[in-house]
Amino acid sequence: MKTNVYILCGGESVEHEVSLKSASAIINSLDRSKYNAYPIYITKEGVWCNLGLWNKKIEEPEELISESSDSIIGSMGKLLTCNYKEGERNIVIPALHGTKGEDGTIQGFLELMNIPYVGNEVLSSAVGMDKIVMHDLFERHNIPQTKYIPIKMHKWMEDEVETYSMVEKKLSYPLYVKPANLGSSVGINRVENREELEEAFKEAFLYDVKIVVEEEVIAREMQVSVIGNDHPKASLPGEFIMERPFFDYNAKYIDNKIIPVVPARLEPDVMDEVRKTAVKVFRALNCYGLARVDIFITDDNQIFVNEINTMPGFTPLSMTPVLWEATDGTTYSQLIEKLIELGFERYEQKKSILRTRCTK
Ligand SMILES: Nc1ncnc2c1ncn2[C@@H]1O[C@H](COP(=O)(O)OP(=O)(O)O)[C@@H](O)[C@H]1O
Ligand SMILES: [Mg+2]
């Protein structure tokens, strides 16, 4: 029997378009002798559109865009009652990034439905999305990172000047100001003085009620993919060379000004250390399936973990597939198959756990 793969894409996040690119590549890669592909497009308003069984090749990611006059709840209910093939081998790939895709909400929904899915679960997704909780957990696990301060909006509003002074007392410029929960560098600013700090606070608080301020790390940026459940493995690291001062939204998605170098130019022992650190991060966050760990390496080879992405980009040019190809020759479609199998493996493992008290 073929496995039914439901690919969720689009969604309410700022990374809607990236998600469509990831999903198109995933759909195109699925071996149709083994899998039925059912893309589900989620509009920017959150309405689920069933695109049915999909057999043709996607040339442009926009082909996945659809419309519906349904309500959010109506659209989800219909989809699940009409199109989910009860009793067959089913799995969902949430090819969604950012808010309501990578933050544990969709994962919680799938848990409630008792549907197997690819990738991280509620806990790791939620923690990975919240830069403050993530930093705190890194600290607890002695994972090297830059100095940071979390700030709540109400504290800032109570006394703005005092908040800026506190930041300046504890950290040294240049600083990065970031909303706690977002992605794609939206709302993030690099600042060098009080005036810029004030502006950056105002902008970051547009996007969240808590923000994080970090000291700048002057370093090269590496990415490592980690894949597995109980025995996660790290890929070779890749690095980016860029012309901009930091990976802002334009650099990431518009200008194509970031040049990937795989594997990263590192001494073998540093390379090993980077890979070990990535696995440590994966375990610290209780990850399952996959994650991409972003790491800074200074010129004197110090490691600082920047962040973890629990549903990294999956276009053919995204680091995750590129890194695995370079590490052990895994092709894009083999990688997707592996992630599907890991999703089923974890589902079976969870199914075997008792939910009620053992009376023996
Ligand atoms: N503390 C820092 N020091 C140096 N550069 C940073 C720092 N924080 C962020 N950056 C730069 O900003 C980019 C985006 O920040 P990041 O925290 O990764 O946000 P996002 O979750 O939106 O990807 C990073 O890729 C890096 O180029
Ligand atoms: Mg990042």
Image (tube, rainbow, N blue to C red):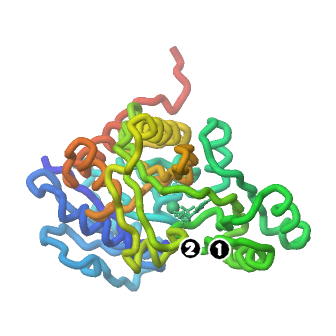
Residue labelled with disc 2 = 186
Amino acid identity at mark 2:
Val
Q: CA distance from mark 1 to mark 2?
A: 9 Å
Q: Indicate the quadrant where residue 201 lies.
A: bottom right
Pinpoint residue 47: horizontal percent, then vertical percent. Answer: 42, 76
Rendered residue at 40%/85% (across/down)? 69
Rendered residue at 65%/67% (across/down)? 179
Dot 1 and dot 2 residues touching (CB under 8 Å): yes
Pinpoint residue 273: horizontal percent, then vertical percent. Answer: 47, 36
Residue labelled with disc 1 = 207
Q: Nearer the viewer, residue 312 or 68?
A: 312
**Residue 123 visible (yes or no):** no
Amino acid identity at mark 1:
Tyr
Rendered residue at 74%/79% (across/down)? 199
- Vertical position of residue 185 compared to residue 250: above or below: above
- Ligand 1 located in image quadrant: bottom right
- Vertical position of residue 279 compared to residue 208: above or below: above
Q: Which label's residue is closer to the chain start, 1 or 2?
A: 2
**Residue 147 visible (yes or no):** yes
Q: Which mark is residue 196?
A: none
